[in-house]
Image (cartoon, rainbow, N blue to C red):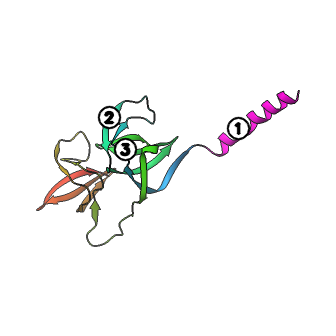
Amino acid sequence: MRFIYYIVSSFVVIFVSMLFFPNESQADTRELFEVGETLLNVRSEPSDQAEIIGKLQAGDQLVAFEEKYGWIKTFYDGKEAWVAGHYLHNIGQVSEAKETEEEKIKVVTKNTHIRSGPSSSYSSIGTLPAGKSYRLIETKGEWHQIEVNNGQNGWIAS
């Protein structure tokens, strides 16, 4: 009888813990991570069985928008994507730019595609290196229109 009581009480404790302490969170502030592995799969869903939609290399940086069961949600090639969090190193928070006369956008990932419009369905007109800042012209949803070179404009995923 004592054994059954132990099993039932253990089950209740585990169940209540799952209700009050879910293993999922929305980030209030966007955190910046760096890839620590040589090659990291980027997946369509937070699962190691999900489709691989790309790869990141050691040193690449990404912005986390959500964490779910150890998986980090980010954007890859303009689409929602997931990477395994245990291969990433947290390197700080992305600071929100204060509104000034000329707002700038800093590119944080290598080879960021510049698109002709605010969606990954638009053609790529080039890529940008990580670390450079560009003048923000307009924002539409998750896309920023920036001034790339000498008045030429393009769109990048936020």
**Residue at the spot 87% in from the left edge and 30% down from the top edge:** 2
Residue that mark 1 sits on: 14
Measured along the vertical axis of the image, is residue 92 above or below residue 45? below
Residue 59 position in % (x across, y down) = 32, 51
Quarter-wise, where is residue 20 in the image?
Answer: top right
Which numbered tag is attached to residue 65?
none
Which numbered tag is attached to residue 53?
2
Residue that mark 3 sits on: 37
Give left or right: position of 102 versus 18.
Answer: left
Give the Cα distance between marks 2 and 1: 35 Å
Residue 55 position in % (x across, y down) = 31, 39
Viewer can see residue 72: no
In the picture, which quadrant includes the N terminus?
top right
**Residue at the spot 64% in from the left edge and 45% down from the top edge:** 21
Kind of residue at disc 2: Ile
Residue 4 belongs to magenta span: yes
SS majority, magenta: helix
**Residue at the spot 76% in from the left edge and 35% down from the top edge:** 10
First in sequence, mark 2 or 3: give its number: 3
Q: Secondary structure at mark 2?
A: strand
First in sequence, mark 3 or 1: give its number: 1
Viewer can see residue 67: yes
Between disc 3 and disc 1, the foreground one is: 3
Q: Secondary structure at mark 3?
A: loop
Measured along the vertical axis of the image, is residue 100 above or below residue 10? below
Q: Which residues are magenta?
A: 1-22
Give the Cα distance between marks 2 and 3: 17 Å
Q: Secondary structure at mark 1?
A: helix
Quarter-wise, where is residue 104 in the image?
Answer: bottom left
Kind of residue at disc 3: Glu
Give left or right: position of 84 versus 133.
Answer: right
